Amino acid sequence: WLAGSYLFRRLRQNPSYYGLHAEPTETAVSKHLSRLTMRCFRDLERALCVRIEPGEDPSDVRVMSTPLGRIASQYYLSHATMLAFATRLPQIEQATTTSGTGAQKTLCQLLCLLSDAAEWAELPVRHNEDLLNRELARSVPFAPSLTQPIDYLSPHVKTNILLQCHLVRAPLPSSDYTTDTRTVLDSSVRILQALVDVAAYQGCVRSTLAAIELMQAVKQACMPDRSPLAQLSPDLLRLPSATDAPRCLGDLMVLNDTRLRSFFAPLATADSPADAVDSWCRAVRSLPAVDVVVDRQARPVAQSQSSSTVSLDELRPLTQYSVTVTVRYAAVRTEFARAKMLKEPGQAYSPRFGKTQYEGWWLMLVHPAAAANDELLAIKRLSMQGRDQKGSGMRVQTRSTSLMFITPEVAGSYALTLHLASDAYLGLDQELTVNLTVVDDAQMVVPKDPSAFLTKDQIGKYQ
């Protein structure tokens, strides 16, 4: 493969520039490329992206990708970014679990981890922008770096400042900063998705949820600790003093059109646009009203070709099952046309992000633990992009997916938590309790083919 690359051609023309300090004979070039290849493999191995094992022949090696390597490939990220995520995420999780680190400190740590990604190394820091960065750092909530003293000439520090300015909607000093912010936002989503995947792979439940919340905040240009109503407009933070007034998006979404318009009318000021009330109403109607249904029948994964199922009240210990979860958008009768706000099916309402985003949801099945870390049993991302089955072009009504998990070893009743987390909206996440019962082998009817289930010895290989 390398023999057909531009590197191979240039190596023969200018060998010293590429580290070949010898005559570019065929043998010398071959050895140089072999050393270069192995050096790259060693770098990937140190970054936990590949695993290198000796082959059958002493001169051969076997190179296999790891989950971190596949994540880096999927999101087109540097191996250095994967190493930073894999190293620092467990530390953040440990601080959150044992030291009781607050949500604000966790958000600060995740912002620093995100901005330290190798992908930002080429962000331009122009002449005298270190002075502007220092000035902007005084107006954002968190310090732009965990290391002291802060290097305001660093592109990573500038990335952190731009992200925080975006979250608090702070004015930027020049058009160059506006362009740089757009560049940062364009790449932030895929890096955040990789951050979620790495946190989930390492079983860091709290860090996974915090990273998802950070993605929601970035898409909505809103700090997570602010009211979710700020996603629609900062004017909505001036809520009526009545105790029964809506205080969250869910309260607004259940109002009919008349009550919704009546709620927004007092919030409009002389400086508000003439159609501000209708615009806010359309924004609320652009948000999805989501219902989640968990099938009470599970299917043994080893019997995927079979139609046999078992109740969640009769599961076998240490067995891998698949359960179907359905996410359904409830139909809402309204006079406010959603098409005036969102032009494409599945498009998310994110007017301040600048680039079209599409609705998606993370499903996380978690086993809560009182004395230890919560155990992440399954996670899957569900996209709602596309047209409905009737081809009307409206929001997709239903999506179903399967979550695979392994039951606990000890028989008994368990209350698992199913997290439904949006990747685009703050304040619409849901938590459901999934009750299941694991019974002893003596209490259940063993199927005719016991090999259809994963054995205890196979669990380690699966994990």
Image (spheres, rainbow, N blue to C red):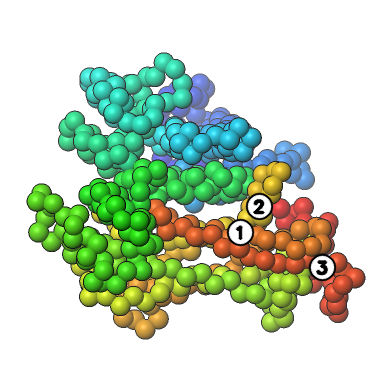
Q: Which residue position holds label 3?
A: 439
Which of 400 and 108 lies nearest the eye of the viewer?
108
> Marks 3 and 1, how far apart in space?
20 Å
Secondary-structure class at tag 1: strand
Q: Residue at the spot x=40%, y=50% of the render?
A: 216
**Pointer 3: residues within 10 angstroms few (<14), some, or many (20+)?**
some
CB atoms of marks 2 and 1 within 8 Å = yes
Secondary-structure class at tag 2: loop
**Pointer 2: residues within 10 angstroms few (<14), some, or many (20+)?**
some
Please state which amino acid type lies under the numbered disc 3.
Answer: Val
Which of 279 and 378 lies nearest the eye of the viewer?
279
CB atoms of marks 3 and 1 within 8 Å = no
User: Reading the chain from its start, which is encountered first: label 2 or label 3?
Assistant: 2
Instruction: Classify 360 as above or below 150.
Output: below
Quarter where residue 337 is shown: bottom left
Percent x, y for residue 345? 32, 70
Q: Which residue position holds label 2?
A: 368
Which of 378 and 244 lies nearest the eye of the viewer?
244
Q: Which residue position holds label 1?
A: 417
- Residue 221: tell me if it is visible: yes
